[in-house]
Amino acid sequence: MKAMQVTGYGGIEMLEEKEVPVPEPKSGEVLIKVKACAINNTEIWMREGAYGQGSQSGWRPEGVQFPRTPGSDITGTVVKTGDRVEPSLEGENVVLFPFTSSGEEGLEHISEDMSFIGSEYDGGYAEYVVWPAELCMPMPLEDFTESAVFSVSGLTAWHMVEQIQIKPGEKVMVTGANGGVGSLNVQIASQVFGAEVIAVVGNLDKAEQLKELGASHVVSYKSDNLDKDILEAAGGPIDAVLDVVGDALFSTSLQVLKKGGRFCTSGSAGGQKTELDFRTLYLKHITMYGSVLGTREEFKKMLKAISEGKLKPVIERTFPLTGAREAQQFFKEAGKLGKIVLLPEGE
């Protein structure tokens, strides 16, 4: 089969087209013909070594074992079943829960042995992938491409909103609101949990589309008076921040939070290190959360919300599988709204 594999840490040249054997499902696993695989920051950072240093960069302490096929937002059709799998699963269209873990229910995402598809396992930048049958869920929508855009970004966003305990009517700022996680933060916080969302983006040309997703206000981080713009939009200090940017908006986030406010981060696209005056933290009684991925129960709740039409797929562009290099480069460009998806069977 055709696969796009990362052959080591480095630049885009480390993502190479290969011909590899079709994997065989082991006991408890199924073989899936990949129909769509959305792109996330995580597979780019995995290739670039951004999760650690050199051989120690990955979701697991030992780092990534190369070559590795990336890709974690996967939909497809079950075409073969291994032992201890109900044969009737063959032919089912599924979306993949993106990691394995021995953690108990509700704590799967923080288990020490959490292992991610596309990092610790070969993922969806390929024509076929194997995965545990119990982690293959029915697709929430009929369309493969539309169903593929939620898995990692949606689970991350859903867990952020639940972890920070957003309540109806609260004023919530979402950074990076035009991205995969950010646009879903906007939708989940507003459409599912009933918050008033202030979306922060670079350019305001996508403002109306973000308002259609549920944002009450859209402001630009390029403003010379961003803190004032946020406070004016919200009518005062805000209750919570859902952040994927990191350093670039960290100071502003703490400044606009009310006393007793909550700050949750799941990304650092705007800088991985920052400065913190602890006095701001304790004098304003701010609670901070680090967050990534989520639980199986949250994944199921998200799929239900998608099937009920509460969350909508937002897709910027699709690429063929062999265009994965171009797709990753496009992913890093500014001004997009929503997800980029690879299609193994072509456009």
Image: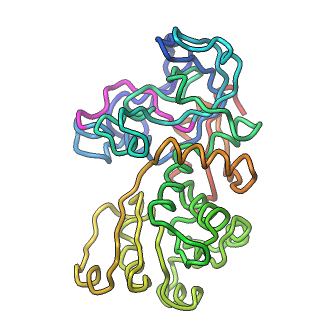
Closer to us: 275 or 10 = 275
x 52%, y 74%: residue: 173
x 63%, y 55%: residue: 338
Closer to us: 200 or 26 = 26
Please tell me whether residue 10 is drawn above or below residue 84 in the rendered image: below
Q: Position of residue 317 (x, y in %)?
A: 67, 47
Q: Where is residue 150 in the image (x, y as percent from the top left)?
A: 60, 46
Please tell me whether residue 307 is drawn above or below residue 284 in the rendered image: above
**Which portion, as a residue range, is magenta?**
61-73
x 74%, y 40%: residue: 141
- Figure coloring: rainbow
**Magenta stretch contains residue 221:** no
Residue 234 occupies which quadrant of the picture? bottom right
**Magenta stretch contains residue 68:** yes
Residue 145 is at least partly visible in this image: yes
* Magenta stretch prevailing secondary structure: loop
Left or right of 247 in this view: 134: right
Q: Position of residue 343 (x, y in %)?
A: 65, 32
Residue 224 is at least partly visible in this image: no
Tag count in the figure? 0
x 77%, y 36%: residue: 142
> Which quarter of the figure is the C terminus placed in?
top right
Residue 53 occupies which quadrant of the picture? top left
Please tell me whether residue 269 is drawn above or below residue 293 in the rendered image: below
> Which quarter of the figure is the N terminus placed in?
top right
Q: Position of residue 55 (x, y in %)?
A: 22, 35
Residue 33 occupies which quadrant of the picture? top right
Left or right of 146 in this view: 28: left
Please tell me whether residue 338 is drawn above or below residue 343 in the rendered image: below
